[in-house]
Image (tube, rainbow, N blue to C red):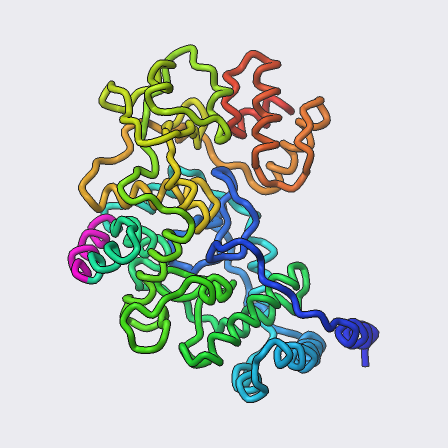
Amino acid sequence: MSPRLSALIAILAATTATAAPERSLRPIGRPAADTVALVSIAPNASLRPSARPAAPALPTPAVTASAEEQAGFEIWVKSFRPRAVAAGITGKVYDRAFKGVRYDPEIVRRDKTQSEFTKTIWEYLDSAASDTRIANGKAALAKNARLLDRIEAAYGVDKEFVVAIWGLESAYGTFRGNTSVISAMATLAYEGRRRSFFEGELLAALKILQSGDTTPDKLQGSWAGAMGHTQFIPGSYQRLAVDFNGDGRRDIWSDDPTDALASTAHYLKTNGWVKGLPWGVEVTIPEGFDYELANRDILKLPSDWARLGIQGMDGRAVPDHGKASILLPAGAEGAAFMIFKNFDVIETYNTADAYVIGVGHLANRITGAGPIRSGWPREDRALTFNERIELQQRLTAQGFDTRKIDGKIGPLTIAAVRAYQKSVGLVPDGYASLRILKKLR
């Protein structure tokens, strides 16, 4: 027996606590994302923000498990069984769920590299609200009109947003994923970088089987365990999925989208959806605007923003729907949005700004609204993961501390970019562009 395998057996024997799922109710297990780096864990054809190289990548050779990896995985599966039983899973359900399940190193490879490549927000939105996706969304809305009206009445969630999520997550049910969820969760739990989270999701998946909502052969989804028409992970499914057609099962996997669409509406309602409230409104920014006010923490009524010169694209003040902040997803040279509470609600489904804008814009287009009218800095490209790391390192070295060197362009890095821009006489929009990186170099 190899030293690694012996060590693994000792570690697993000492590990007895059952891990709790992540507290967040978002359907996917994902670190906070942003408009510069968009990561993907949904089926290949989903429009969940997708990691994509700037140039065509060479084919990646298939990854297969070594004999040692598979042996270690099988030991881990046996060691996890009593913990699952202690959590309420019967031995019969556990053994049936793991029949034929193997360690899949390809899932680990994809999980490790998901942040490496990037896509700009305008490239993403070009796909999210393409002519085909809009047309298919209108068709889906019409075909399921009676069902969607019932769901809207039951949960108070505007039906076009449910349809838009359906469209981005699985192309209206066309691509729901074909990876065994048990295999995916067990592989990622065994691999260990986020063990507690994926062990919790594995237990949630086993509870789905024990409840009889589906069977092991049908419990399929993306490589990271997102399932069904609208891509719930197991923990969120357990908390928020509903049996809307009354057949005794919460079935989000079958061709019938009833339970999946109702579950999505229930999810949005639970997270605070306000019916009839816009997710956001495209606006114009006046010359001389203080770009430091474009901050998610700064909330004003649209009438107050209008006094600062921010207006709708029609040249008039945006109606006072409620307090809103200003979002510049591509900096001062791209489109600007006044965003409301429902933006935050969609964000609980996926934290990437591009995804939220994609859902909101697609929902609007499905119901007849026009395209985004402002331009984008299409000459730019998104920073790669290594370039984002370099940006943070160079900002910090020059006295603009990002606090973390992790390749994620979150609020701390945006604040550092703003401070640097002010110091060199640039518009302080906080946009982490290639031009900023080149200037820092």
In percent of width and height, residue 231 lies at 41, 61
Q: Looking at the picture, does residue 259 appear above or below residue 341?
A: below
Is residue 141 shown in magenta?
Answer: yes
Q: Residue furthest right?
A: 3
Quadrant for residue 440, please give it.
Answer: top right
Left or right of 5? Residue 25 is left
Q: Looking at the picture, does residue 340 appear above or below residue 347?
A: above
Quadrant for residue 129, please give it.
Answer: top left
Q: Residue at x 53, y 74 (%)?
A: 182
Q: Residue at x 30, y 50 (%)?
A: 157
In this view of the protein, which residue sits in the foreground, 278 or 329?
278
Left or right of 361? Residue 440 is right
Is residue 300 shown in magenta?
Answer: no
In percent of width and height, residue 367 lies at 20, 44
In percent of width and height, residue 358 lies at 35, 43
Q: Residue at x 34, y 24 (%)?
A: 302
In this view of the protein, which residue sits in the foreground, 66 or 405?
405
Magenta extent: 134-146
Which corner quadrant holds the N terminus? bottom right
Which corner quadrant holds the C terminus? top right
Q: Look at the magenta stretch and give its main secondary structure.
A: helix
Q: Residue at x 28, y 54 (%)?
A: 163
